[in-house]
Amino acid sequence: MLSSKEIAKKWETIAGGKAGLHPVKCLLLGLLAGMYIAFGGLGSAVASAAIGGGMGKLTGACVFPVGLMLVVLAGAELFTGNCLMAGPLSNGRVSLGGVMRNWGLVYLGNMLGAYLMARLVCASGFLENEALFNTAVTTALNKCNLPFGAALLRGIGCNVLVCGAVWMASGSDSAGGKAACCFFPVMAFVLCGFEHSVANMYYVPLGITIGKTLGSSFPAYRYGANGVLPENFTAVVTWGNYLLKNLLPVTLGNLIGGAGLGIIYAKVYKD
């Protein structure tokens, strides 16, 4: 396992590679990461809905890290983890243009991948399970009801943990070590209820899709036992509320938390 000083030096090379990544590759790897995080979100919801209560929440938190494990071990570009590029940027080791290009393309790819997964989950019949349907609906509603300030602060807390996981995983040279580094911090952020922008790119569009397709004659769209939504669901879970009241503050929070962590380490261990 590398020391933090060695990891800081390694991230200068990692950031340079990410900043120079071909735009098409950047977008495609971002799409994969969005799908991977959504897989983690789906697995977490299935576990939580099946067990219920506090134990269900804990089990769901233990399943979610599979998304980051796939990103780190299989190889993909995740916006939240790439916030660590701010560290080498602050020391002049990588260009601002390269970092902005990576963040923009990766963010777009993450959004596309997560949205595709939301549509796949709806159309594949997963939500015929009443408990899973109710979990998906409640999650989307709660996220769109979250105050701007709370969403921002929860985004900061989330990405300190996610980037801490990515930072540690960068220092391990074994698959088992990388997986362990991903597991505990990500499990903690899910258990605590922090907000992850890429996960929300799946959770809320899933709720929006449910609201728009509930009662559709298309046979793939069958929801729960009765498919009943809360009275205010379609008024609250909208694209406008999602983008402005959740995704915007959570993304800003993730950026502050992740970039801040990267900058602190870069400055502390600068040669």
Image: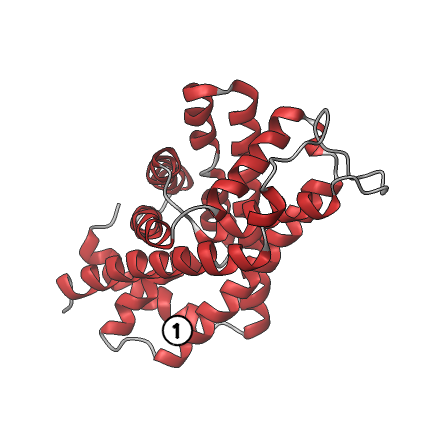
Report the amino acid beneath label 1: Val
Q: Position of residue 166 (x, y in %)?
A: 35, 50
Q: Is residue 32 above or below residue 218?
A: below
| Mark 1, secondary structure of its residue | helix
41 vs 27, nearest the viewer: 41
What is the quadrant of residue 79 in the picture?
bottom left
At x 74%, y 45%, the residue is 213
At x 74%, y 34%, the residue is 125
The C terminus sits in image quarter: bottom left
At x 26%, y 56%, the residue is 7
Label 1 sits on residue: 99
Q: Position of residue 204 (x, y in %)?
A: 56, 48
Q: Position of residue 101 (x, y in %)?
A: 46, 75
Residue 57 falls left or right of residue 237 = left
Q: Position of residue 96 (x, y in %)?
A: 35, 79
Q: Is residue 102 above or below residue 144?
A: below
Residue 77 falls left or right of residue 27 = left
Q: Note whether residue 20 is visible.
A: no
171 vs 189, nearest the viewer: 189
The N terminus sits in image quarter: top left
Residue 87 falls left or right of residue 241 = left
Number of marks in the rendered image? 1
Q: Is residue 204 above or below residue 185?
A: below
What is the quadrant of residue 229 in the picture?
top right
At x 32%, y 76%, the residue is 94
Q: Note whether residue 113 is visible.
A: yes
